Image (cartoon, rainbow, N blue to C red):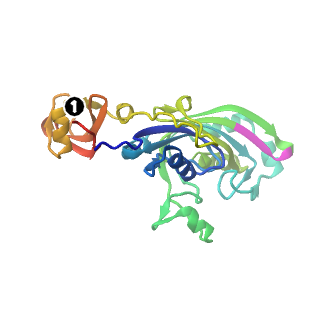
Amino acid sequence: MSDTSPQGVLVCDKPQGLTSHGVVSRIRRWYGTRKVGHAGTLDPMATGVLVLGLGRGTKLLGYITGVSKTYLATIRLGSATPTDDADSEPDLFAKPAALSAVTDAGIAHGVSALRGSIDQVPSAVSAIKVNGQRSYARVRAGEDVELKARRVEISDFTILATRYSVAEGHIDVDVEVDCSSGTYVRALARDLGSSLGVHGHLTALRRTRVGAFSLDEAVTIPDDLDAEAPALTSLAEVARTLLPTVDVDSAEAKALMQGKTIGTERSPDQGSEVAVIVGEELVSIAEVRAGGVLKSQTAFAIDLA
């Protein structure tokens, strides 16, 4: 008997104030299914692209999580917060003379130093696990947490606008950031402020792209979850954006689903992974072995009858 529960991927525009897990809960109710996951957490303050997998779509989330991302953000220079963003109140403030000394050239220089491959220390109030426990939980329990720097790639960090409100104690800088998975934009805000000697934190964050998924295709979650849920993007369509693909016939698909290997001259180099597709159905994510032989690593049960 075929599985009639929702299967696929949904790109949604996460609203401000809702956690990523909160979005998952709403999507479960909207589509009437328990099997829902997301690819890459957005903080409650943040909005924008959140990619969700439903049913067998959850098996693709690991491939989506690691792709590059684009953000629009506002960095407030002049103060810092414990969370490096507006989810907590400022507790450190720049001296007026230091803030008055900040110039466009100085901001541009600080931004330039944060482009490329950098070692970034994530915010202590983050979901990174330390000895099996989330870092933010340790901080809230009163511990001093020092996370290790991690190498991230900032492929673009562009200043869009700068608004000087020195008399009010801040300078706001609107930026666009293209970065690798694992980058904390609020840490960029913190480090830019630190390099200028005036502190810094994030006041707005909107994710506009996750890999090939953008806001143009994002769905707004309605308040009324009785509204008809939109169609999901098929697993095959999503897989084609993530991996090289190999098209097979039904007999080859059945062999892979039974744990057997199949030979093909249509696959990339040994050691790589490919999406195996029959018709418009994703059969598996397979490893390319010596001689072009394919062995299924992640199977997607489909009805080939």
Q: Which residue is mark 1?
A: 267
Give left or right: position of 85 versus 70: right
Among the 4 quarters of the image, the one containing residue 91? bottom right
What quarter of the picture does the C terminus occupy?
top left
In the image, 53 versus 245, the foreground residue is 53
How many labels were placed on the picture? 1
Among the 4 quarters of the image, the one containing residue 80? bottom right
What quarter of the picture does the N terminus occupy?
top left
Is residue 95 positioned above or below 244 on the image?
below
Is residue 123 positioned above or below 283 on the image?
below
- Magenta portion: prevailing SS class: strand
Q: Residue at x 14, y 41 (%)?
A: 261
Q: Amino acid at mark 1?
A: Ser
Per the rendered image, the range of residues in magenta is 168-173
Is residue 148 positioned above or below 16 on the image?
below
Name the residue at the right extreme.
167
In the image, 162 versus 139, the foreground residue is 139
Residue 168 in sight from this viewpoint: yes
Q: Position of residue 100 (x, y in %)?
A: 81, 43
Q: Residue at x 77, y 35 (%)?
A: 163
Q: Residue at x 54, y 63 (%)?
A: 135
Among the 4 quarters of the image, the one containing residue 77? top right
